[in-house]
Image (cartoon, rainbow, N blue to C red):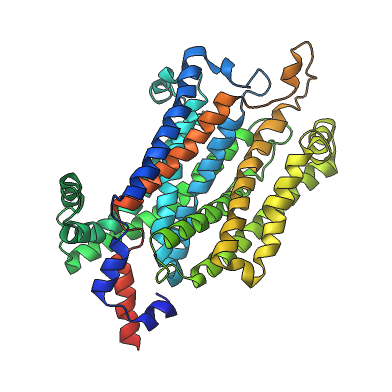
Amino acid sequence: MNDTITKENLNDDQIDQDLLKNVNWGNKFKLWLAFLSVSLIICLYFYYQQLQHGLGVTGLHDYVSWGIYISNFVFFVATSLIGMLISSVLGLMNVHWVKPLARIAELVAVAFAIVAGLIIITDMGRPDRLLNVFMHGRVQSPIVWDIAVIVTYVAISVLLLYIPLLPDIALCRDKLKNVPKWQQKMYKILALGWSGKTRQFKIMNNYTRILLILIIPIALSIHTVTSWLFAMTLRSGWDSPIFGPYFVSGAFVAGCAAVIITMFFFQRNFKLQKYITTDHFDRMGKLLVLVALVYVYFNINEIIVPGYKANTADAKHVDEMLYGHESLMFWLVQLGGLVIPFLLILFKPMRKPLPLTLISIVVLAGAWFKRVLIVVPTQLSPYYPIQNVPEKWNHYSPTVPEIAITLASFILVLIIMTVLAKLFPVISIWEVKEEMNHNKELA
């Protein structure tokens, strides 16, 4: 796995003990889950208010009909793509250092992808008509395609999390005798009769490889289709042929930051320093620099090209971003959320676990606000002047219900990841043992 584990010369029993100890429902976990649950219920109360009174409780109006709900949707879809980058692209390239991180990346991908699908419903004034999209949707509609690829991506991501988890589920079934009976029964059902035979490993590896290959075009589709929802309009700020790769590169930045934060939390709380090492943070920092460099290029391109053409609508949009009402958020996002973190991570001390995690929190926050900048200002720069309407329609500010409902999506992600991390090992035990045995044979 890495030099640290090789030098430690851990045996199988020690590895089992280290990586199964997070699978427990201690008091700290119960308190944390209770806090998240109460917070979610409070936020869902505001969604109940929205259902009762309609979208009028939000800051949305005829001009800004997409606000932080859709910004949040784009952000969640983006962050979920990290599972494809780490598990599929780097995994298929046989990059060994990502193995302890692959399951963590899939946890992030599954949680964010599931909630991304739910976020669409929050923006609907009549969610009771959601089934009409499936029953009467037109194949020409990019929204239908967006829902289709999200559902497919969630399904494949769940399978990519579940299938390589089978040996560890069987280990939980055989070793965890102190867990509640319902949990023991769950492990027995989910293990599918796994006994560790060579043939079972061969079948598991074959199916996993198929899914790793299949998820790459699906993952790229989910965010390029999302970008089409914007780019297939004639609005300045959205009317761009680069939105597909622009969205994907930005997705990798947000996803890398989310994985680094999750790594730090698991390493510290589950005492996994032997398995998630400083070297892993260093390499993830370098990966973040690489994807950020690509993303910086698209951010520059986003301003230079319309700025060079400088037609009336493009010029107004660029001016608004650079010098106008949105300029403060724009420069904070570009400099504070991308350029400065990118420059800091170039220095090795900044790729240590704590500083890299703090930087990643800033990057992830910047990635969310960047989606707001993509969605909102364009709608406030229409081709026709905004006139003969209420003054507040000249601007957009999210209301308390919008903010609470948006917070609910983050809380739900934390609940999903927390529960999964307490039901299953967050690092693949069988892969750690396999790599250890391989290193011993080479030695």
Q: Is residue 100 visible?
A: yes
Q: Quadrant of residue 403?
A: top right
Residue 30 spot, x, y in % from top left: 33, 44
- 47 lies above or below 4: above
- State which quarter of the image contains the C terminus: bottom left
Tell which of 321 and 353 is nearer to you. 353
Q: Is residue 162 left or right of residue 281?
A: left
Tell which of 9 and 302 is nearer to you. 9
In the picture as drawn, the residue positioned furthest to the bottom comes out as: 443
Q: Residue at x 17, y 48 (%)?
A: 189
Residue 194 spot, x, y in % from top left: 17, 59
Tell which of 77 and 337 is nearer to you. 337
- State which quarter of the image contains the N terminus: bottom left
Q: Residue at x 84, y 44 (%)?
A: 308
- 85 lies above or below 365: below
- 109 lies above or below 100: above
**Count of numbered badges drawn on the protein:** 0
Q: Residue at x 81, y 41 (%)?
A: 322
Q: Is residue 236 left or right of residue 133?
A: right
Residue 441 spot, x, y in % from top left: 30, 85
Residue 402 spot, x, y in % from top left: 56, 27
Q: Residue at x 39, y 47 (%)?
A: 417
- 310 lies above or below 164: above
Tell which of 130 and 279 is nearer to you. 279
Q: Is residue 149 visible?
A: no
